Image (cartoon, helix red, strand yellow):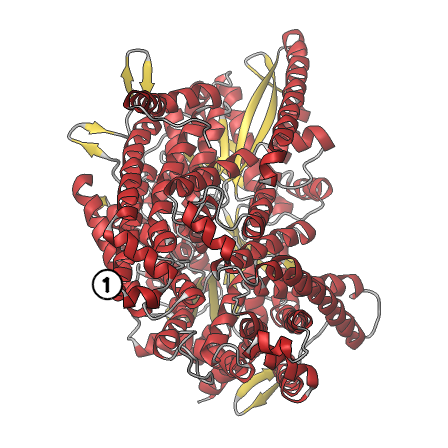
């Protein structure tokens, strides 16, 4: 693709250095060029990178179609929100809370996985969809008779990430540079996203990763080869869910507010599309998918002024246009490039064979 | 007792609509093994086309039955054309692709339909003009309107007709043969593509009828009305045994009744802990339980492959 | 691969478009700058953020249109602030009723140098966005978010021009029990922050007044079938049914009440007091009641005129919150006039001191940014039209003492939700 290969260690080192430096200055460069909006969009995109990587474990590696993935995101978000806000008056530290969120999401993953292990393909999709909706409905209604989640009102004033006196919700100055919350969160999210990428890549090549792929390709053959399909599938659900749990916690801290309407079916479908459009089972593809699908809708907002200048009026609401293009992209991708924009070689071959 | 009978009546009317929509899911699933996520949105298109006709003709002085007939006709033509073209353009090229591909395409088509409808009909809630004034009568202590009765009877009639069509006619037999084994059916001289198109044609026609019923009964139409209705109907199809026409009818009616009774009585049964706010949970719970305990549904044949 | 071959063409086309767009933009901004030096016209950007797509788009667009009308009217009047002519420009952003998008949109408005924002529609969007406006020091007036928490976060920049749930609910309850003499009432909500908040506040006051809440049921803001809960309610034989929610549900609900033979009347809040409710419920709307903050529109100075202008401009009836959006723009303009500046840092303190006669009634804020208790009017559908039945002024005329009182239940309601 690149036209040349990085062979010598020195070349690799330089390339790595350039990328690292690029990522470090990215938020400030983006702010200077496009405004702070885009720094925020990148923050959100990084959260979605984590989510998409988590779903990729379930859909991409293990081949289990999950249409309710946002439920785990919700669980993580609510665990953080409930234990670090004035709602119950509990203010735990984030380094304790994020793992708790991951664990609870993990438990929900197993809870969903266990009864649905026998199902495959479309049926699993529908059951997971139902599961996602059930979680949302419960979050919306667990305010009576005992108020646990505060219902549709959601939870406000959630603690930001902080360590000792350092709080990420404050502005800091470094010489001439103002480091706003969006910048601080960028670095935290970047670190988490990079860690997720690292874990995903390592998983892919591990014994478990290969077992997942074996199950995806042919479950019966995998079983015959001595893979404990039940445990391995459960592990996929648990693993994917814990990614969602952690990003949920980060989301809570970043937004300072959670309510059930952040976790709808459409969000689940969005995350799925990131995985699918990017390239199922291929980490760089999934990352690309997440970044593209977060940034593109925002970029499309700029279409309205263009229409205004061309036709003198806004013919198609930019947000309608966004959804139309989005639907069209899904259909066209599946028709012409089913393995995704940036597929792994194995996956590409598979789709070509059909 | 009156209340109980009334809840059953409520459930049957709701169930009639679920059943008609479920038929579309079940037929497509039976023949292609695909959850046609866009089916609920075809119902929506049918409903909105019907509304447009009602609005255009409500002041024209034409007799009401004629207006109704024209609306149903227009909705059916549009939906059928839509259904068949969606199959032709989006699903047919993917017939041999991995299962995930057509499923994701279906989600894409669903989004496309919704937002195209938003462009055509705007995003407003569209009210139904005053066309019918239902009269009420009492059956076993429950109130029933003639509209409700008509919906129920029409749904039953349509379903009986469909059942006859599938079991007794040549084309119906061809459809069943295709469902069982496409290759062999092809060898027997059945034009598979034609049969699949026909399935979409019939399913979309039924969706149009269901859409008109929704509009007449609830008096409201909206571009996003199809998705949840579609999900419920799919649940009904699974409950009855997907791929099974009689199952879809039974599943639809049952789901309607379950929802009615559950939201009516759950509060009393659980001492007020669960209320009618969990109504949608019941539908999904039914779905999960059926899939886990009896994946072939109530009337389906046990089949290892689907589960 | 075909896509890749086409890529250069697409890129070239995109570049051309962008260039031409930039060119145009420069041309127009140069054109607008030229008279600026001559006539001293200052362009002031006002943001509006609401769901312009999705199931709530009709209400979001209603707000946008209301704000647009406000901006147009002000521009037509020719506003002068600090000796300079001011021209308002509207930046409309779609928050999709999604909390995450709401923060992005908020940041975008801040980046685009909006000096004030009208929005958002949903409390779920207004609350996370309020943090960003507060950081930027830009005043935000929500035309519609009724969640009490919105103004309880301690931000100086958050205001609303709508009665929150703890204000409208009790008034409605008072009317139901005292005026209508209802002793047994059934309450339904739509499981949203708005509907449930209103219904909870209503239920609480009804109980305090000694009436009986015979059933408490719930539906969702997407449902159209209420026969099951209505049948259950019918079994409890209420004299009145209160619905906390909006018209797409209330319309079919009234219809289904009629077909189930329920004789009790339906009463609701401002989410129902819309022309759409009458269209959706048809004949079944007759005799149903709903409250709306403010005086009856025909009694408002400029109220009927507003409706007419709105209708002729947008070819649509006012749905719900357009008047609030319209008034919010005037609140900003008024504050700028008094501060003599269009700088948010200068006119923000003046927003809190607003005393304005708006379409929705007298507008004054308390120290949290909530609307001081203004009048609330209860309407009834008569011959297919909303007709004012009675105007209730809670605690007499809006005075500081009277307004301070309803804030106390804020903590209590939090426990109650």
Quarter occupied by the C terminus of chain C: bottom left
Other residues around mark 1 within 10 Å, as few (<14) / some (14–19) / many (≥20): some
**Which residue is at the front of the view, B100 or A114?**
B100
In the rendered image, the residue lying farthest to the bottom is B140
Residue B217: percent from the left, percent from the top? 62, 72
Asked if residue A78 can be seen in this view, the reply is yes
Instruction: State the residue lying farthest toward the right.
Output: B61
Residue A138 in the image, given as x and y percentages of width and height:
34, 61
Please tell me whether residue C380 is drawn above or below residue A317 in the rendered image: below
Q: Quadrant of residue C63?
A: top right
- Side of B79 where C406 appears, left or right: left
Q: Position of residue B239 (x, y in %)?
A: 45, 78
- What residue is drawn where x is 35% and y is 45%? A53
Q: Position of residue B151 (x, y in %)?
A: 63, 80
Q: Does C257 sit left or right of A171 as displayed?
A: right
The quadrant holding residue C358 is top right
Q: Could you say which is closer to the camera, residue B136 or residue C291?
A: B136
Q: Which residue is at a point 30% across and 35% down the rendered structure image?
A: A194
Q: Nearer the viewer, residue A114 or C187?
A: A114
Question: Vertical placement of C269 versus B133: above or below?
Answer: above
Q: Chain of mark 1?
A: A
Q: How many marks?
A: 1
Provide the residue designation for mark 1: A231
Quadrant of the image for the N terminus of chain C? top right
Residue A266 in view, yes or no:
no
Q: Is residue B58 left or right of residue B103?
A: right
As helix, strand or loop, the secondary structure at mark 1 comes to helix
């Amino acid at each position: 693709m690149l036209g040349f290969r990085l062979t010598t260690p020195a070349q690799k080192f330089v390339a790595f250095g350039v990328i690292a430096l690029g990522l470090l200055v990215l938020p400030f460069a983006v702010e200077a060029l496009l405004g702070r909006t885009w720094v925020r969009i990148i923050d959100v995109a990084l959260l979605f990178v984590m989510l998409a990587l988590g779903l990729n474990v379930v859909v991409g590696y293990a081949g289990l179609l999950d249409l309710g993935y946002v439920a785990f995101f919700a669980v993580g978000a609510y665990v953080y929100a409930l234990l670090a806000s004035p709602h119950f008056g509990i203010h735990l530290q984030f380094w304790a809370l994020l793992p708790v969120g991951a664990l609870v999401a993990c438990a929900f993953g197993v809870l969903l996985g266990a009864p649905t292990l026998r199902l495959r393909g479309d049926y699993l999709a529908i059951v997971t969809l139902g599961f996602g909706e059930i979680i949302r409905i419960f979050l919306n209604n667990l305010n009576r008779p005992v108020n646990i989640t505060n219902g549709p009102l959601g939870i406000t004033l959630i603690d930001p990430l902080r360590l000792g006196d350092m709080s990420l919700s404050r502005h800091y100055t470094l010489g001439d540079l103002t480091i706003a919350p969006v910048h601080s969160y960028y670095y935290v999210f970047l670190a988490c996203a990079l860690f997720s990428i690292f874990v995903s890549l390592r998983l892919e090549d591990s014994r478990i990763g290969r077992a997942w792929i074996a199950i995806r390709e042919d479950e019966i053959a995998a079983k015959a080869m001595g893979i404990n399909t039940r445990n391995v599938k459960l592990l996929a659900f648990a693993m994917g869910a814990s990614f969602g749990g952690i990003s949920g916690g980060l989301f809570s801290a970043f937004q300072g507010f959670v309510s059930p309407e952040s976790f709808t079916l459409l969000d689940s479908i969005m995350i799925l599309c990131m995985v699918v459009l990017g390239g199922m089972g291929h980490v760089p593809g999934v990352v690309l998918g997440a970044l593209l699908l977060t940034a593109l809708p925002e970029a499309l907002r700029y279409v309205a002024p263009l229409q205004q200048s061309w036709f003198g009026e806004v013919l198609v609401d930019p947000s309608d246009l966004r959804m139309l293009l989005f639907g069209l992209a899904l259909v066209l991708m599946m028709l012409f490039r089913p393995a995704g924009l940036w597929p792994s070689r194995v996956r590409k071959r598979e789709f070509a064979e059909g | 007792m009156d209340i109980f009978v009334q809840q059953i009546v409520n459930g049957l009317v709701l169930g009639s609509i679920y059943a008609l929509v479920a038929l579309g899911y079940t037929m497509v699933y039976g023949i292609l093994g695909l959850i046609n996520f866009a089916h609920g949105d075809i119902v929506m298109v049918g409903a909105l086309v019907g509304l447009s006709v009602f609005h255009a003709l409500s002041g024209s002085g034409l007799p009401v039955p004629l207006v109704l007939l024209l609306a149903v006709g227009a909705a059916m033509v549009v939906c059928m054309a839509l259904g068949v073209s969606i199959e032709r353009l989006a699903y047919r090229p993917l017939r041999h692709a991995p299962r995930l591909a057509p499923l994701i395409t279906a989600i894409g088509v669903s989004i496309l339909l919704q937002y195209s409808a938003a462009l055509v009909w705007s995003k407003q809630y569209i009210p139904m003009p005053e066309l019918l004034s239902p009269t009420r009568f009492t059956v076993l202590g429950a109130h029933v309107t003639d509209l409700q009765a008509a919906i129920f009877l029409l749904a039953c009639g349509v379903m009986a007709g469909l059942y006859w069509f599938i079991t007794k006619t040549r084309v119906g037999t061809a459809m069943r043969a295709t469902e069982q084994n496409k290759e062999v059916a092809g060898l027997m001289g059945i034009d598979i593509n034609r049969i699949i198109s026909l399935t979409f044609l019939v399913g979309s026609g039924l969706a149009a009828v269901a859409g008109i019923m929704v509009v007449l009964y609830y008096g409201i139409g909206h571009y996003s009305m199809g998705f949840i209705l579609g999900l419920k109907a799919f649940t009904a199809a699974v409950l009855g045994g997907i791929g099974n026409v009689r199952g879809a009818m039974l599943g639809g009616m049952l789901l309607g009744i379950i929802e009615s009774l559950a939201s009516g009585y759950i509060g009393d049964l659980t001492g007020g802990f669960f209320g009618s706010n969990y109504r949608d949970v019941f539908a999904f719970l039914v779905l999960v339980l059926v899939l886990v305990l009896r994946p072939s549904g109530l009337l389906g044949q046990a089949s290892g492959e689907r589960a | 691969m075909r896509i890749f071959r086409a890529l250069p063409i697409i890129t070239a086309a995109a570049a051309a478009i962008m260039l031409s767009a930039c060119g145009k933009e420069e041309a127009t901004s140069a054109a607008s700058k030229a008279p600026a030096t001559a006539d001293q016209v200052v362009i002031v950007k006002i943001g509006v953020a609401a769901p312009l797509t999705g199931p709530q788009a009709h209400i979001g667009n209603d707000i946008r249109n209301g704000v647009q009308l406000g901006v147009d009217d002000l521009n037509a009047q020719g506003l002068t602030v600090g000796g300079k002519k001011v021209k308002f420009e509207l930046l409309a952003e779609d928050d999709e009723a999604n909390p995450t998008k709401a923060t992005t949109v908020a940041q975008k408005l801040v980046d685009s140098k909006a000096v004030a924002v009208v929005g958002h529609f949903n409390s779920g969007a207004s609350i996370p966005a309020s943090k960003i406006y507060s950081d930027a020091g830009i005043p935000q007036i929500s035309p519609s978010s009724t969640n009490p928490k919105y103004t309880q976060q301690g931000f100086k920049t958050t205001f609303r021009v709508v009665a929150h749930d703890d204000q409208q609910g009790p008034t409605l309850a008072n009317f139901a029990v005292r005026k209508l003499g209802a002793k047994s009432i059934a309450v339904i909500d739509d499981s949203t922050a708005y509907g449930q908040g209103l219904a909870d506040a209503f239920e609480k006051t009804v109980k305090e007044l000694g009436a009986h809440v015979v059933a408490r049921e719930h539906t969702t803001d997407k449902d159209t079938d209420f026969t099951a809960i209505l049948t259950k309610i019918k079994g409890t034989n209420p004299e009145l049914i209160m619905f906390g929610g909006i018209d797409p549900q209330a319309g079919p609900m009234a219809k289904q009440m009629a077909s189930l033979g329920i004789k009790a009347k339906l009463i609701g809040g401002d989410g129902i007091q819309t022309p759409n409710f009458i269209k959706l419920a048809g004949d079944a709307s007759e005799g149903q009641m709903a409250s709306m903050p403010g005086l009856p529109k025909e009694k408002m100075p400029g109220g009927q005129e507003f409706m007419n202008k709105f209708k002729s401009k947008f070819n649509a009836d006012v749905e719900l919150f357009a008047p609030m959006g319209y008034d919010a723009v005037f609140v900003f303009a008024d504050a700028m006039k008094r501060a003599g500046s269009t700088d948010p840092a200068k006119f923000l303190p003046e927003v809190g001191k607003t005393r304005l006669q708006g379409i929705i009634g007298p507008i004054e804020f308390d120290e949290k940014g909530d609307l001081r208790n203004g009048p609330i009017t209860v309407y009834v559908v008569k011959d297919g039209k909303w007709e004012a039945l009675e105007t209730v002024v809670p605690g007499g005329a809006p005075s500081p003492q009277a307004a301070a009182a309803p804030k106390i239940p804020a903590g209590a309601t939090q426990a109650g939700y």
